Image: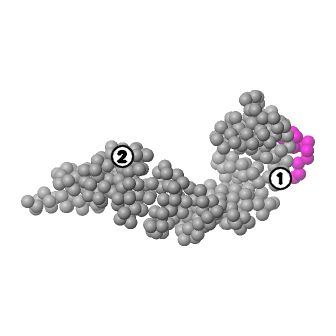
Amino acid sequence: MRRLYWAEIALLMATVFISSGQNNSTEIMCSNLEDCYNQGMELLSQDNCSKAYDALQKAITYNQTNSDAWVGKGRAAACMSKFSEAIKCCEAAMALDKENAQAYVVKAEVLLAQNRTDEARAMIEDAVEKNISNPVLWIACGKVFSRMEMWEDAQKCFNRATDIDINNAEGWYLEAKALQRLGRFEDAILVYNQSVNINTTNTDAWLGRSQTLEALKLYAEAEKSYSKVLDLDPTNEDALFQKGLMLLLLKRNDEALETLTNLTELAPNNAAAWMREGFALAKLGKCNESLAAYDKAIALDGNNTDALIGRGDAQLCLGRVNQAQETYEDVLRMDRRNGPAKERMAQVLYLNCCVA
């Protein structure tokens, strides 16, 4: 990349200013670069994109050579889907400070949002080559490869980030995700452990760790890990759903029912949750309640053959053999090769035929 001279930098920044047009910055109450920048970034963290944009635009009026303010404005522009302007803001920041890693990160994110993955990759690889010791750039590189589903390359980038900065919790977390996608579950657990030891409140990392333990069939450890997710976020539906399954597999049916009841109260339109609650109730011999739960699941998803089989089982548990037969027949009309339905049909036919 050839060197940009100050006249060209000034022209680039002026172009971005002109393209921004008239904005409503009068609502932003700040009187210097730092205050405006901090206010803009706070608004951005609240997803108040328009006001964040105004605040960061105002920050730049106080100092047009502050590269961080240009990056912040680029983030706000991207948040508003003003992708062309966002890229120009990042390029202005790069022109002012070629080592501003966030400028490259934001530009890569914008290019990825536009599905311009090859450009994002080329830009980030060039940035890494020029500043190979910056973990932020290596993480950005890994994110680009992740978007391209090149998981081995992504994992290597994230690994380089943590080699440079061993306390980079995000790098450890993203590397663990890449290892998980590669099916390297034992390695992924070790890396997830590094991440959650550094940042104990990252629910995404705890959830990924839990899923990996589940994939390894370490159900007791997975249940504890899902519980940690729920300590941090009691309304996490994925964690409630999977914790319920772990408890069922561990034959802790009362606890499973409590967990799944919490989920159906939180997400009453989740058919799979009602189905799993029906199963837990059946395990506890609560046939009427099980039937009611399966009926709710079927009302939400009438094509769910597992829920229909569960309904038939609950009907059979209540001694309603003819109703159970009709339910299993419904399943076989939907899927004539359904093995569990065939087995149950054999059972009800035997009951109708041979039991007095």
Residue pointed to by mark 2: 301
At label 1, the amino acid type is Lys
Q: Nearer the viewer, residue 173 or 35?
A: 35
* Above-or-below relation of 275 to 13: below
Residue at left 88%, top 40%? 10
* Above-or-below relation of 287 to 179: above
Mark 1 burial class by Cα count in 10 Å: few <14, some 14-19, many 20+: some
Q: Residue furthest bottom?
A: 186
Image position, residue 169 (x, y; %): 65, 61
Label pair 1/2, CB-CB below 8 angstroms:
no
Mark 2 burial class by Cα count in 10 Å: few <14, some 14-19, many 20+: some
Q: Nearer the viewer, residue 48 or 300?
A: 48
Q: Which residues are magenta?
A: 1-12
Q: Quadrant of residue 37?
A: top right
Question: Which element is circle 1 on?
Answer: loop
Q: Is residue 183 left or right of residue 296?
A: right
Residue pointed to by mark 1: 98
Q: How are the colours assigned in the image?
A: one colour
Q: Is residue 178 among what the camera can see?
A: no
Q: Residue furthest left?
A: 356
Q: Nearer the viewer, residue 85 or 218?
A: 218
At label 2, the amino acid type is Asp
Residue at left 64%, top 41%? 46
Picture disc at residue 335:
none
